[in-house]
Image (cartoon, rainbow, N blue to C red):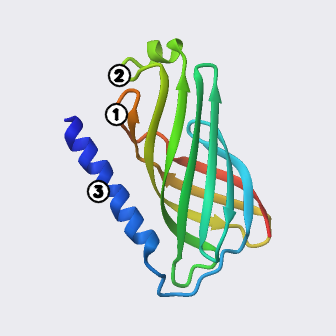
Amino acid sequence: MKLTRFITTISFLMITYLANSQASTEEYTSPYKKAIGFKLNPGAISYRSFYTRNKAVEGIGFISIDGFQLTILNEKYFPFANAENLTWYIGYGGHFNLWSEKYKLNNPAKSAGVAVGADGMLGLDYKLKNAPINISVDIQPAFNFVGASYFDLGWGGIGIRYTIK
């Protein structure tokens, strides 16, 4: 079971990496350069910054009474035909968690302490046309390989951010 999850995660990350490394067939420039806001599920702060026309780095920070998680992702954006300001994106990155013993009590399959792992990202991104607001929906599969080893699909969510041109 763990081997299957591991292979699935590695396969997803490899596909993500290959998609990120390929040049887009369409010229695309993001309608914003930076964005900061919240990501719902589990409730985190999100900061995104484009470093090329269609590639961004995103930092996601989650803090709770049980501990914290910090995730850094590299993302590539692709436009939809005839859909202004709507893109889909794919990415990869990693996370660092530090969880208390209380977290382990509430999540018996997981362990307290330090956890480090790899993340993938697949989502939709929309920038409102006449407002400095960005909305995204994504799924973020993750695999921990330091600390308790497990596969987790629970870190995706809905992001709402203030954009800066």
The secondary element bearing badge 2 is classed as loop
The answer to whether mark 1 and mark 2 are in CB contact below 8 A is yes
The tag earlier along the polypeptide, 3 or 2, is 3
Cα–Cα gap, marks 3 and 1? 15 Å
Residue 70 lies, with reference to residue 91, above or below; the image says above
Mark number displayed over residue 11 = 3
Task: Give the position of the C terminus as an image quadrant.
Answer: bottom right
Give residue 105's position: percent from left, percent from top. Answer: 45, 12
Give residue 55's position: percent from left, percent from top. Answer: 59, 70
Q: Residues within 10 Å of mark 3 (few under 14, many from 20)?
A: few
Q: Is residue 148 left or right of residue 5?
A: right
Determine which residue is flagged by label 1.
150
Q: Nearer the viewer, mark 3 or mark 2?
A: 3
Give residue 121's position: percent from left, percent from top. Answer: 47, 55
Name the image quarter holding residue 18: bottom left
Mark number displayed over residue 109 = 2
The tag earlier along the polypeptide, 1 or 2, is 2
Name the image quarter holding residue 65: top right
